[in-house]
Amino acid sequence: MSGQLLTKNELLSLSARRFQAVGSKDLEATMAILVDEPVFEIFPANLRLSGQANVRRYYANYFAVASDRIGGEVVDAFVSDNSVCLEMKMRYETAPGKVEHFRIIAVQPVEGERFTGERLYGDERLFRLMFPEPIWSLFEPIEP
């Protein structure tokens, strides 16, 4: 499909494949659905994590530390010509029996048939849980 825009259904299918790869903790499948140099940005914290090595390190850490403690559901999905935007309800088990709830917006830009990364809008508390140290320190400020 090089050079052609994906249809709405193809974009949603691509997003579902990404969720499947992440949900199964398959690092190689997760990285394969991303461009070679992905960029993850979080707002309103205005921070960026970029590059293959840093994003791979994030996912390896996420699978080992956070993925069993986090869950969520899609409230709604919006599709443009080159991205999927998800509104999500998230929950994070901070301790046995103690769950915190969050809402986020996740914009997933697409280039070809791979995601360029993600722009996440939400509570910094959730992001610090999703990207715990040593990953949090890999983020760089986004210049205004």
Image (tube, helix red, strand yellow):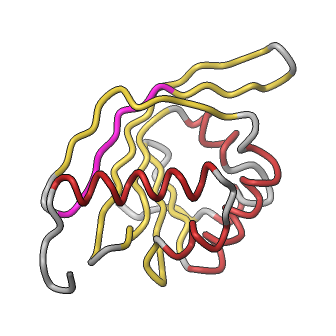
Residue nearest the observer in this picture, 78 or 142:
78
Query: Where does the magenta region start and end?
Result: 82-89
Say left or right for 32 vs 6: right
- Count of all numbered marks drawn on residues in the image: 0
Q: Please, is residue 10 above or below residue 4 in the view?
A: above
Residue 56 position, x and y percent, is 66, 72
Farthest residue to the top: give it: 97
Q: Please, is residue 82 above or below residue 76 in the view?
A: below
Say left or right for 17 vs 81: right
What residue sits 51% from the left and 56% below the top? 47
Residue 137 position, x and y percent, is 71, 60
Say left or right for 65 vs 109: right
Residue nearest the observer in this picture, 141 or 34:
34
> Within the magenta stretch, is there residue 87?
yes
What residue sits 67% from the left and 67% below the top? 27
What residue sits 72% from the left and 60% below the top? 135
> Within the magenta stretch, is there residue 115?
no
Say left or right for 59 vs 140: right
Q: Quadrant of residue 25?
A: bottom right
Position of the C terminus, as image quadrant, is bottom left
Residue 6 position, x and y percent, is 17, 67
Q: Quadrant of residue 22?
A: bottom right
Q: Please, is residue 87 above or below residue 117 in the view?
A: above
